[in-house]
Amino acid sequence: MEKFYFSTIVSDKYLYKLIVMYKTLKHHCDDFHLCILCTDQTSYHILSDLQFENATCFCLHQIQDKDLMKAKTNRTRQEYAWTLKPAMLYYVMKNFSDTAYYAHIDADICFFSNPEKIFNENPSASLYLTDHNNSNKFMDTYDLTGRYNTGFVGCKNDLTALEAVKWWRSRCIEWCYKDPDIKAKLFGDQRYVERWPKNFSNVHIVNTKGANVAVWNIDNYQLSYKNEKVYIDHEVLIFYHFSGLSIYSSKEFNLSWFCGLPNTAVNLIYVPYMKLLSETIENTKKLHPNFSNGFTLKGKISNIHYHKI
C-alpha cells in the first residue's frame, strides 16, 4: 500500500515538465503512486517506454464518458485539460482505494522536498487547498483566478473528499473556460474549489509557505539556501509551480511571460529546474529523436524573462 496516490494530466507540450515533476517527486518521496493521464498518443507512448517506477499511464478512453466527450467538443485543448483534472482525480479515487491520501498535481510543478509535510499539517482533514498568497503586483488577480490554486489539490481517502471531487468534476463538465466570468466567480477549473469550505467539512487551507510557491507570490518571501535545501523565509520549499515558463530549446527558456523575477529566485529555484529540463530534453532526444514537441517558438509569447544556461 502506497500512502499517496497522485494524479496528473500531460500532453506532448508538457512532457518534459512532467518527467521532471515525476523525477523530483521520486527523489523526495518513495511512498506514492503517480497516475498519469496522457491526452495524446505521443506522450502516452514515450512515457510508457520510460517505464517509470511508481507510475501508471492512462489513455483518454479509459476515463472519458459521454459527458466528458461532449464537453470536449466545445473547449480548447487547454480548457479540456483543465476539465480533466477533477475527472482524473475522481477516477483514481474510485479505482485505487488502498491508500491514505490523494492529490492532483500539475505537470509544471517541481518538488524540492517531501510533500508529506502538507498532509501532516492536519492528518484528519478531508480536503487540502493552497492559497495563491498573491504578492502586491498580483493582488488584482484574485477576482480573475480566485483565492486558491488548483495546481495542487489534496484529499483524504474518505467520503467527504470523494463527494467534493465528484461535485468539482460535474461543475467542470458544465463550465470550464479560460476567459474568467467575474460575476459568476468562474475561471477554468479553479474557482469552483472556493465553495468547498462552505459546502464540505474538514477543508484545510495549507499553512506552510513552502507549498505552491510561484511567480505570483515569490515577491512575498526571503529566499535562502542551507543544508542543501531552499528556504522560503524560514520554511523549507516543498514544491514550486513553474506556471508561465516556456521552453525555447534545451538551453534557452523564458521564465515568465507576464513579469520578471527576483535574482535570488532565478538562481536558487529556476536555474536548477532549467538544468533538469535540459537534461530531460537531451535524454528524450536520444530515445525518441523524432519527437519535436514541448517547445515554444520565440516571438510567440512576450519575452519578459529570457534566460540561457
Image: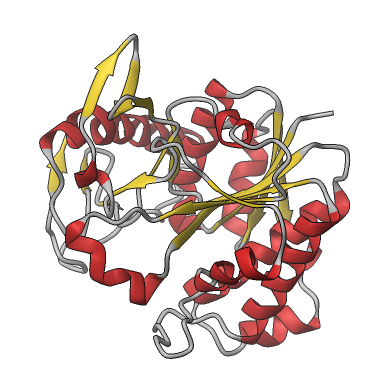
In the displayed structure, 171 sits above or below 94; it is: below
Examine the image and state in which quarter residue 97 appears. top right
Q: Is residue 185 left or right of residue 198?
A: left
Nearer to the camera, 14 or 236: 236
Q: Give the colour scheme of this rendering.
A: secondary structure
Q: Position of residue 76 (x, y in %)?
A: 49, 80
Nearer to the camera, 227 or 80: 227
Examine the image and state in which quarter residue 28 appears. top right
Question: Can the viewer see residue 44?
Answer: yes
Q: Is residue 274 left or right of residue 89?
A: left
Which residue corresponds to the image point at 70% horizontal and 57% vertical from the top-left? 89
Which residue corresponds to the image point at 19% horizontal and 46% vertical from the top-left? 219
Nearer to the camera, 212 or 122: 122
For the N terminus, the image quarter is top right
In the displayed structure, 245 sits above or below 277; it is: below
Which residue corresponds to the image point at 87% horizontal and 52% vertical from the top-left? 95
Q: Position of residue 17 (x, y in %)?
A: 44, 45
In the displayed structure, 224 sits above or below 7; it is: above
Question: Can the viewer see residue 59?
Answer: no
Examine the image and state in which quarter residue 131 appears. bottom left
Q: Position of residue 120 (x, y in %)?
A: 62, 30
Which residue corresponds to the image point at 30% horizontal and 30% vertical from the top-left? 275
In the displayed structure, 289 sits above or below 74; it is: above
